[in-house]
Image (cartoon, rainbow, N blue to C red):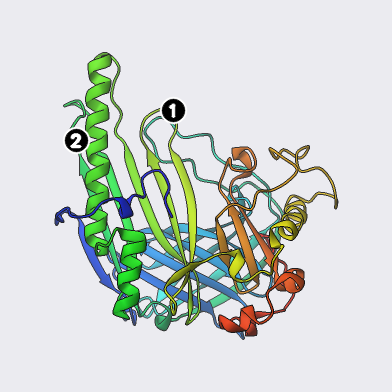
């Protein structure tokens, strides 16, 4: 799970600074809502097995995580804010992330044990804001007027057991080293993350694999120190080259989130946004599907039979056409994609409805398309799964329900 600055595994041995470090041990949520707290929680719609699932991390007012409609087989990113009075508003982004497929408005009740409100789904229409100015946060997809497809009242109940083994932290820090004395904005570092508490052998594997062998707090501090050091060196070189050109502050915002979980499997996501000079910042999402029992990262080859590399691309391309509203067999390239074929890539993920492949913005199509989460439902991949593979990983009860898997309602 390495993007440009996710370098935990490359650094070992730094000391931790206490600035801005907050600890949150997950478990049963408090009965009192604290607007300044950091929380990590899974919420399931109070229905039968099917319904909307929200896997959210809240850092002060900022809320981020994943959403899934298990009945429809749709999946994506949830992002929004929570206010001091406990009200919460989320944007639900699907394929691509430029598609605002829905919103949720409601409030936390009983602390953060319950969320009640209304979810609305709209007919998707692609649009993203103008690109961010130099030094600002990345542009955020936004809504435009469009027909309303569905609106319903919902009530979510928290699932503390799904996060009970997680130890969550956040680190916020800033520096003005290397910036002009009159600079109003500092270079900033924000990271919210987690690691597993038990069993110890799995926790140690997790630290070695994702954090360079360090506990999560120490790994965050190492990452921060490396980022601030790189900025200081770059600012010095930039100023020496041309003192008349202003130096802009950098930023780093990393958010780990829960993509999916079962008693055995855990899908960890990381959304990382950075600005390190130039016209625009960079952002991307990475996933790692983790086998908690055997302590290893799983990939398509663990579930699909030999020859899956040849079978999967055509399924992905068919799903992409459905997402874009194209005719079967039509050219993806003529619709704006870079090529008519989709690479398999390494961003493999799991949902209740099937396996999927994620593509970051600009990876397979221009930025206006945003990110793509292409879910292949169980019914479509039944013939290429290894015999008994789903049952061996405790997923047998999930298939096949034939969900949509298109990334939008």
Q: For the N terminus, give its image quadrant.
A: bottom left
What residue does disc 1 label? 279
Q: Where is residue 305 shown, x and y percent of the image?
A: 69, 69
In-front residue for pair 365/91: 365
Residue at (63%, 78%) from the top-left corner? 389
Give the farthest residue toward the front. Answer: 306
Residue 33 is at least partly visible in this image: no
Provide the secondary structure element on which disc 1 rests.
Answer: loop
Earlier sequence position, callout 2 versus callout 1? 2
Q: Quadrant of residue 375?
A: bottom right
Q: Give the CA separation, mark 2 to mark 1.
A: 21 Å
In-front residue for pair 187/13: 13
Give the number of the disc on residue 379.
none
Instruction: Give the class, few, some or many, for how many residues have Cα within 10 Å of label 1's Cα (few <14, many ≥20).
Output: few
Q: Is residue 252 above or below residue 379?
A: above
Residue 372 is at least partly visible in this image: yes
- Answer with left or right where residue 64 lies relative to residue 48: left
């Amino acid at each position: 799970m390495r993007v440009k600055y996710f370098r935990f595994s490359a650094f070992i041995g730094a000391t931790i600074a206490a600035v801005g470090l907050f600890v949150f041990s997950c478990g049963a949520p408090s009965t009192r809502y604290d607007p300044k707290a950091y929380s990590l929680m899974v919420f399931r719609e109070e229905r039968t097995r099917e319904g909307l699932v929200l896997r959210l991390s809240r850092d002060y007012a900022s809320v981020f995580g994943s959403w899934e409609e298990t009945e429809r087989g749709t999946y994506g990113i949830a992002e929004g804010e929570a206010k001091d009075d406990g009200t919460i508003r989320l944007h639900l982004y699907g394929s691509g992330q430029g598609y605002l497929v829905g919103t949720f408005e409601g409030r936390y009740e009983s602390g953060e044990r319950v969320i009640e409100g209304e979810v609305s789904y709209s007919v998707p229409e692609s649009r993203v804001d103008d690109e961010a100015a130099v030094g600002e946060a990345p542009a955020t997809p936004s809504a435009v007027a469009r027909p309303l497809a569905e609106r319903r009242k919902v009530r979510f109940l928290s699932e503390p057991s799904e996060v009970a083994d997680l130890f969550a932290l956040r680190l916020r820090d800033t520096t003005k080293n290397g910036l002009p004395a009159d600079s109003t904005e500092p270079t900033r570092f924000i990271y919210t993350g987690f690691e597993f508490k038990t069993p110890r052998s799995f926790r140690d594997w997790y630290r070695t694999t994702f954090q360079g062998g360090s506990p999560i707090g120490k790994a965050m501090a190492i990452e921060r120190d490396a980022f601030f050091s790189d900025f200081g060196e770059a600012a010095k070189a930039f100023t020496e080259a041309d003192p008349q050109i202003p130096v802009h502050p950098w930023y780093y915002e990393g958010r780990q989130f829960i993509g999916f979980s079962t008693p055995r499997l855990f899908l960890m996501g990381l959304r990382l946004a950075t600005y390190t000079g130039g016209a625009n910042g960079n952002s991307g999402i990475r996933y790692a599907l983790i086998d908690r029992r055997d302590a290893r990262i799983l990939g398509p080859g663990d579930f699909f039979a030999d020859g899956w590399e040849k079978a999967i691309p055509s399924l992905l391309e068919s799903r992409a056409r459905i997402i874009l509203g194209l005719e079967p067999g039509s050219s993806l390239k003529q619709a704006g994609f870079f090529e008519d074929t989709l690479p398999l890539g390494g961003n493999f993920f799991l949902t209740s409805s099937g396996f999927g492949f994620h593509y970051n913005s600009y990876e397979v199509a221009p930025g206006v398309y945003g990110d793509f989460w292409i879910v292949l439902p169980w019914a479509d991949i039944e013939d290429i799964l290894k015999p008994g593979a789903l049952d061996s990983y405790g997923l047998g009860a999930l298939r096949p329900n034939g969900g949509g898997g298109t990334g939008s309602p």
